[in-house]
């Protein structure tokens, strides 16, 4: 039980800064009268998440406290992130904006670096301490916990911001981040055994694994269609006539709980139906979910008449997205080599993150050129096309768990 509580707390913690700074911060800065160009830089501040594979091998080799490889990194990075939050909370938002915003942007880069490093160590700890049969559920908790953290900081705190203000909001996030690590003090992970091979050749060993190229291709394309399609859901529903309050209910409440259920169900099913069936089946479900948005842009000015269609589309898409992510993360754990869980998992997750960033950047171009219907049909087609890599790995037996 201590293991599950520790992982749940840590994954919730990771979603807190992203929820606040990714969703609330742009609105708050705009209210301060800042230029949209500067506000746009906020998305760039998360680049440490895409580059964490660079320093991840160090976490397999070095400990910050003797005999406490994973916990030493997790606790040090988490509490360092808390200190950054307290620095940001020490002055009102107006002070930071009037100072040119460059210092708070640098602090946010530092914050993301600390949290990304905590994520490396947490994923490695999960990989080393979850039995093969538990990894599906573990990754369901990972996806669900991160979503909970985001909705707490990016939803609940936004609604209370008028009462709490800048400093108290950050103090509350910092307190939650400390609270989220408390279960870890009562869980002692398995000792990490260090492989003393030279660090660089050891890291390159991942690329020498069987069918490494096909596997990396799968990572790059598995969520590409989903990442291309989903950024245009909110603009689609807005153009279809939904009001801001309706969008909040549909995407913020219905979508959140659907994604939560999908992540947990996907993790549970992956452990029972097998990696092969889960990866292929959830990918097909994602394609069908994206197709459910086709035709919505023709609803006219009274979308409430088709509220059932809209709700069904949002629920199916969020459930499918959560299931597919949980299944993919589970197999990523299976691909990690002994002694190299931090480096291997971080490398794989960065491939997924970078691919998603590219897809998200292309989504607006796709929707403007193809229209919403064409855009979602293309996204669904890319999900189906990604099944080719899944089929290749199934035929070669690389998705069979042999441990």
Image: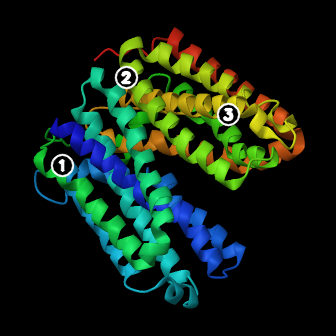
Look at discs 3 and 1 and give the one toward the viewer. 1
Label 1 belongs to which residue? Answer: 183
Question: Viewed as shown, does residue 244 lie left or right of 299?
Answer: left
- x then y, percent, for residue 350: 50, 45
Quote the CA–CA distance across marks 3 and 1: 37 Å
Label 2 belongs to which residue? Answer: 268
Q: Residues within 10 Å of mark 1 (few under 14, many from 20)?
A: some
Query: Element type at marker 2?
Result: helix
**Between disc 3 and disc 1, whose residue precedes?**
1
Question: Viewed as shown, does residue 94 lie left or right of 129?
Answer: right
Residue in view at x 25 percent, y 50 percent: 61
- x then y, percent, for residue 191: 13, 41
Query: Element type at marker 3?
Result: helix
**As displayed, is residue 274 above or below residue 111?**
above
**Label 3–label 2 contact, CB within 8 A:** no
Quadrant of res 399: top left
**Between disc 1 and disc 2, whose residue precedes?**
1
**Between disc 3 and disc 2, whose residue precedes?**
3
Residue in view at x 26 percent, y 54 percent: 180
Quote the CA–CA distance across marks 1 and 2: 23 Å
Q: Quadrant of the N terminus?
A: top left
Q: Quadrant of the C terminus?
A: top left
Residue in view at x 42 percent, y 55 percent: 152
**As displayed, is residue 74 above or below residue 145?**
below
Query: Element type at marker 1?
Result: helix
- x then y, percent, for residue 179: 24, 58
Let me know if residue 169 appears in the view.
yes
**As displayed, is residue 49 above or below residue 34?**
above
Residue in view at x 52 percent, y 60 percent: 46
Q: Residue 225: which numbered mark, if any?
A: 3
Q: Residues within 10 Å of mark 2 (few under 14, many from 20)?
A: many
């Amino acid at each position: 039980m201590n293991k599950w509580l520790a992982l749940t707390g840590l994954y919730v913690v990771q979603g807190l800064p992203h929820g606040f700074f990714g969703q609330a911060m742009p609105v708050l800065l705009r209210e301060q009268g800042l230029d949209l160009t500067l506000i746009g830089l906020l998305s760039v501040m998360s680049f440490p998440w895409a580059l964490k594979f660079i320093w991840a091998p160090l976490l397999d080799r070095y400990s910050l406290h003797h005999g406490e490889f994973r916990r030493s990194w997790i606790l040090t990075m988490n509490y360092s992130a808390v200190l950054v939050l307290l620095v940001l909370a020490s002055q009102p938002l107006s002070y930071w904006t009037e100072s040119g915003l460059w210092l708070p942007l640098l602090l946010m880069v530092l914050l993301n670096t600390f949290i990304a490093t905590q994520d490396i160590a947490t994923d490695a700890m999960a990989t080393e301490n979850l039995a093969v049969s538990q990894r599906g559920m573990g990754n369901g908790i990972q996806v669900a916990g991160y979503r909970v953290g985001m909705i707490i900081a990016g939803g609940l705190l936004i609604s209370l911001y008028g009462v709490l203000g800048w400093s108290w909001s950050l103090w509350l996030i910092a307190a939650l981040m400390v609270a989220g690590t408390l279960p870890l003090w009562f869980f002692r992970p398995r000792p990490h055994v260090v492989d003393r091979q030279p660090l660089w050749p050891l890291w390159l060993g991942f690329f020498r694994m069987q069918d490494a190229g096909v596997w990396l291709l799968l990572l790059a394309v598995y969520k590409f269609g989903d990442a291309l399609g989903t950024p245009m859901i909110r603009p689609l529903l807005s153009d279809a006539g939904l009001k801001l309050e309706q969008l909040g209910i549909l995407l913020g409440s219905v979508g959140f709980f659907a994604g939560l259920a999908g992540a947990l169900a996907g993790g549970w099913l992956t452990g029972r139906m097998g990696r092969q069936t889960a990866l292929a089946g959830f990918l097909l479900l994602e394609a069908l979910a994206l197709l459910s948005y086709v035709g919505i842009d023709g609803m006219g000015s009274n979308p409430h008449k088709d509220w059932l269609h809209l709700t069904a589309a949002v629920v199916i898409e969020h459930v499918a997205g959560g299931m597919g992510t949980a299944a993919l993360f589970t197999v990523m754990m299976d691909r990690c080599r002994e002694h190299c869980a931090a480096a291997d998992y971080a490398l794989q997750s960065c491939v997924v993150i970078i691919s998603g960033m590219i897809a998200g950047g292309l989504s607006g171009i796709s929707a403007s050129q193809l229209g919403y219907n064409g855009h979602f049909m293309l996204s669904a087609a890319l999900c189906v096309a990604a099944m080719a890599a899944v089929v290749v790995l199934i035929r070669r037996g690389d998705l069979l768990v042999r441990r």
